[in-house]
DNA sequence: TCTGGGGTCCTAGGACCC
DNA sequence: TCTGGGGTCCTAGGACCC
């Protein structure tokens, strides 16, 4: 049976979300910035056509922004996450749950193999119309026999207007597909990054068509099994299946500071806060961490500064999801790696070696198998409930610091409201 | 002055086993 | 001069993704 995979992708996702709630930004060159208003992470089409690359530092383009009246918004992940969930639910209405894979915050694969009667161009237009009407977001749809071809089709749908935002390669002629592949740079293929593209060029592989026609075994010898699969997928041989939601294998929480930090106590404060975030995510997936890592960083862009970016991990005797245990471990790491005299700009924590909390292996050297302490469990669950109900900062460790916005806290100078997730910030429509 | 924050998979090499 | 054969597990680093 020929597979029919579609990829639905929101155009300029963060910018488009902001425009749903602020229509005055339609047609206006708009960017959304990373945390601390550092880099451009989303660009409206007007900004793309000005040649602004993804990831450009905002301070480097302030002149350009003044010239062209570019609006810059701080990123509002609460809003984007909620709009993403709504969008994915609408897309999910077009196939049974097992045939949808939510691949990222703005992309979803849908497997239409089991609906062979469906015209994918018509289905793609139906998805576009419904997502637009129900969420306000614009999407493009690409379809192909493999995930890699669906990705490519989506790229074509976005870049080539004659497709009207929906490109179905499963029903396109061989000549059409060949012409499209010959006109697209190999760098655009899913799985081919900057490094591999650079190494492919001297081998005469410039376009998608060149890569499709390359010898898969040779690609494997030179680049590994991942690129071999990509070549096979471009030829319509499925190597990648739709994936279920898997629990995370590691959880990271880190942030650049709003202002540099020099002393250990302040670094400790930041690490405690980030650990609270990481533990929230851990407990949401019902996991326990067997290893804890932490790191601090100086500013690698400042050549005049002495650089020091240490990291370390420590194993726990027993996997844990207890914020006190995990924070204590991270503090132990910080004490081991901290050195005074550096200008730190970032810190982070990692929870590693994650397992299912309910399936724990005993420790040979622990005096006895630690039974789960029901009173402790109740305490932690109560803290979770209070924080979910009244906000993340409601109950924390006593040592987390009492300042709500310490000097190192993130700077977000142009943040939109949490329109869809806070009663106090619901949009008001006057007429 | 100001340069993000997450993730995954694969491979090579070292250390160890019988 | 000559030095087996077959494994596992772990880690670090590299590549990619959004």
Image: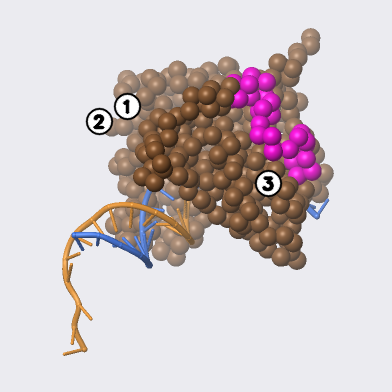
Chain colours: A brown, B blue, C orange
Q: Which residue is mark 1?
A: A113
- Give the mark, 2 or 3, whose residue is nearer the N terminus: 2
Q: Is residue A147 left or right of residue A277?
A: left
Q: Which residue is mark 3?
A: A268
Secondary element type, mark 3: helix
- x 41%, y 64%: residue: A203
| Circles 2, 3 touching at the beta carbon (< 8 Å) | no
Q: Which residue is mark 2?
A: A1
Place residue A83 in its image quadrant: top right
Q: Whole-Å distance between the Cαs marked 2 and 3?
A: 57 Å
Extreme-front residue of the structure: A367
Q: Which residues are magenta?
A: A383-409
Secondary element type, mark 1: loop
Q: Quadrant of the N terminus of chain A?
A: top left
- x 60%, y 25%: residue: A383
Q: Quadrant of the C terminus of chain A?
A: top right
Q: Whole-Å distance between the Cαs marked 1 and 3?
A: 52 Å
- Give the mark, 2 or 1, whose residue is nearer the N terminus: 2
Q: Let me know if marks 2 and 3 both belong to one chain.
A: yes
Which percent across, then down, holds residue A39?
Answer: 69, 46
Single out the mark in the foreground, 2 or 3.
3
Mark 2 surroundings: few (<14), some (14-19) or many (≥20) residues within 10 A: few
Q: Is residue A254 left or right of residue A368?
A: right
Q: Chain of mark 3?
A: A
């Amino acid at each position: 049976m020929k597979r029919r995979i579609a990829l639905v992708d929101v155009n300029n996702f963060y910018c488009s979300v902001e425009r749903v709630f602020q229509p005055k930004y339609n047609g206006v060159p708009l960017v959304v910035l990373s945390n601390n208003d550092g880099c451009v992470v989303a660009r409206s089409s007007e900004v793309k056509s000005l040649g602004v690359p993804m990831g450009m530092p905002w301070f480097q383009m302030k002149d350009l922004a003044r010239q062209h009246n570019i609006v810059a918004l701080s990123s509002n992940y609460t809003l984007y996450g909620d709009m993403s969930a709504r969008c994915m639910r609408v897309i999910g209405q077009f196939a049974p749950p097992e045939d949808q894979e939510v691949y990222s915050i703005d992309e979803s694969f849908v497997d239409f193999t089991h609906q062979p009667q469906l015209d994918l161009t018509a289905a793609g237009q139906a998805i576009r119309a419904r997502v637009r009407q129900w969420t306000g977001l614009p999407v493009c749809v690409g379809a192909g026999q493999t995930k890699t071809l669906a990705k490519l089709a989506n790229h074509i749908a976005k870049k080539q207007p004659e497709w009207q935002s929906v490109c179905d390669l499963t029903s396109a002629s061989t000549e059409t597909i060949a012409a499209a592949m010959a006109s697209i740079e190999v760098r655009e293929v899913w799985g081919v990054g900057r490094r591999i593209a650079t190494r492919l060029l001297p081998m005469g592989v410039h376009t998608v068509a060149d890569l499709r026609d390359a010898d898969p075994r040779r690609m494997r010898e030179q680049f590994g099994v991942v690129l071999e699969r990509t070549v096979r997928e471009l030829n319509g041989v499925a190597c990648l299946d739709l994936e279920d939601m898997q629990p995370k294998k590691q959880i990271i929480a880190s942030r650049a500071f709003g202002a540099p930090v020099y002393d250990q106590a302040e670094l400790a404060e930041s690490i405690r806060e980030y650990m609270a975030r990481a533990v929230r995510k851990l407990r949401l997936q019902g996991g326990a961490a067997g290893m804890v890592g932490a790191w601090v960083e100086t500013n690698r862009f400042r050549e005049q500064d002495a650089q020091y970016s240490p990291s370390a991990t420590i194993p726990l005797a027993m996997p844990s999801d207890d914020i006190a245990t995990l924070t204590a471990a991270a503090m132990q790491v910080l004490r081991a790696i901290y050195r005074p005299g550096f200008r730190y700009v970032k810190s982070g924590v990692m929870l590693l070696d994650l397992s299912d909390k309910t399936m724990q292996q005993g420790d040979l050297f622990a005096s006895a198998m630690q039974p789960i302490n029901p009173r402790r469990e109740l305490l932690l669950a109560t803290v979770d409930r209070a924080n979910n109900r009244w906000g993340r900062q409601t109950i924390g460790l006593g040592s987390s610091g009492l300042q709500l916005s310490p000097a190192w806290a993130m700077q977000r100078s142009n943040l939109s409201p949490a329109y869809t997730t806070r009663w106090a910030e619901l949009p008001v429509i006057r007429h």
